[in-house]
Amino acid sequence: MNAPQVINFGCRLNAYEAEVMRAQAQNAGLRDAVIVNTCAVTGEAVRQARQAIRKARRQHPDATIVVTGCAAQLEPEAFAAMEEVDRVLGNREKLHGENFVAPQDQKILVDDIMSVEKLAGHLVPGFDGRARAFVQVQQGCDHRCTFCIIPFARGPSLSVPIPAIIAQIQALVDNGYEEVVLTGVDITSYGHDLLGQPNLGHMLGQLLAAVPELPRLRLSSLDAVEIDPALERLLLDEERVMPHLHLSLQSGDDLILKRMARRHGRDQAVDLCQRLREGRPEMVFGADLIAGFPTETEAQFQNSLALIDDCGLTYLHVFPYSERPGTPAARMPQVPGPERRRRAGLLREKGASALAGFLAGQVGGERRMLLERPGLGRSEQFALIQLDQPAALAPTRGIVTVRILAAKPERLIGQLAP
């Protein structure tokens, strides 16, 4: 072990930041170190981070262990108190290499994240072991959903200027990347803090025009209520934007959505999915759903279960509700833990059935597949495809046309088209 190792938890934004940290820390001279980039979206995510820290110390007894990310931003003293930890960095501090090699007596370097006023893009030449690249276009969140602690870990909503985004993606394309995922905490809020207030649709239009050789572009989680007509038209008309959207829905019941302080209603979500699928029939949707939010009744849960069919959801991220201290929802009447887990299990079962139905419908068709490793990759709709040939004989990278032969649980089987 010499170059810093990054153990990454959480969202796609963390995947981008992991590469920034790796490069920044190495350029600053950090060696023989483990950087643990934590997540705070649930209590379970924080527990897993602590477990990983202890494991890292057992495996690398002489390494420097640096803990950062959202959980570290929110609970720096708690992580600093762990005997395995050498340094704790906040979400702003982790993107600057000098903080990784600060004097030993500075164990905690965590500033007020709400004081950040500008967001600069970091030029990342590539992503270790990945076929697709992640590019940060936005950071932070100005909304206050009652269940969510992330705005206090990430700070206010800030946007990367369009020229910096274009430069980053051009560099990645020049280095051979054929798919880019735009990431952020709330990317549909893009641009409100920039001169002229360009919105997400405006930025995407400029980006696609400026980098015509980029074959595939994906978007991370979108807030359904912020998909305006201009963005909707781009999603329908631009073939290089992949027909796979992940929506932040959280619930299928209007009263629960109101108690969550979400800004969309059930009908808005259903109407959006129907419009997009009518305009682009190959479009598929993923969604975040929370099971057992405080006060959720069985009937309200059934509305969330029905939303899978009503929206035609294919990929689900299901979370049993997790109390986060300091959030309004933590003070509401709670659904018992076993009931939350039962409801989450039912959502996952229905989600697995929806995915199986979608995959079965792909058999006999052709798809363009981005190879992630020999013989394995993702279609335009993010379906996992395994080539029906030995990995040693399969192509190793690029985008190839594949005929779909069969569907198995959670993946398709295909062969290279002639």
Image: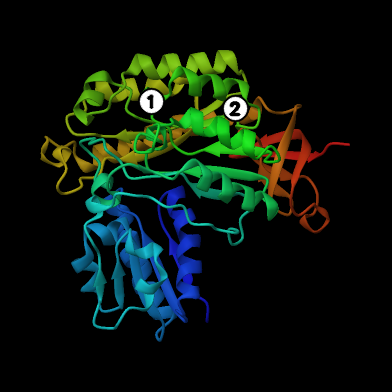
Q: Residue at x 54, y 19 (%)?
A: 233
Q: Nearer the viewer, residue 248 or 155?
A: 155
Question: Which residue is at 31% across, 37% downward?
Answer: 342
Q: Quadrant of residue 267?
A: top left
| Residue 342 in the figure: left or right of residue 398 | left
Question: Which mark, residue 72?
Answer: none
Q: Is residue 366 above or below residue 408?
A: above
Image coordinates of residue 137 in percent, x first then y, are 46, 44
Which image quadrant is residue 59 in?
bottom left
143 vs 48: above or below: above
**Amino acid type at image mark 2:** Phe
Q: Residue 154 at x, y = what percent?
A: 30, 50
Q: Which quarter of the image is occupied by the C terminus?
A: top right
Residue depicted at 26% across the width and 22% down the height: 300
- How many numbered markers are drawn? 2
Relative image position of residue 253 (x, y in whole percent): 28, 21
Nearer the camera: disc 2 or disc 1 = 1
**What element does badge 2 sit on?**
helix
> Which residue lies most toward the right here?
418
How crowded pointer 2 is (Cα within 10 Å; few <14, some 14-19, many 20+) is rated as some
- The residue under label 2 is 358
Q: State the mark number for residue 226.
A: 1
Q: Secondary structure at mark 1?
A: helix
Specify whether 133 is left or right of 224.
right
Question: How far, Cα to Cα, is label 2 from label 1?
Answer: 27 Å
Q: In this orientation, which residue lies closer to the viewer: 342 or 122?
A: 122
Between residue 131 and residue 379, name the one nearer to us: 131
Residue 49 visible in the displayed image: yes
Counting residues from the start of the chain, the first of labels 2 and 1 encountered is: 1
Q: Residue furthest front?
A: 195
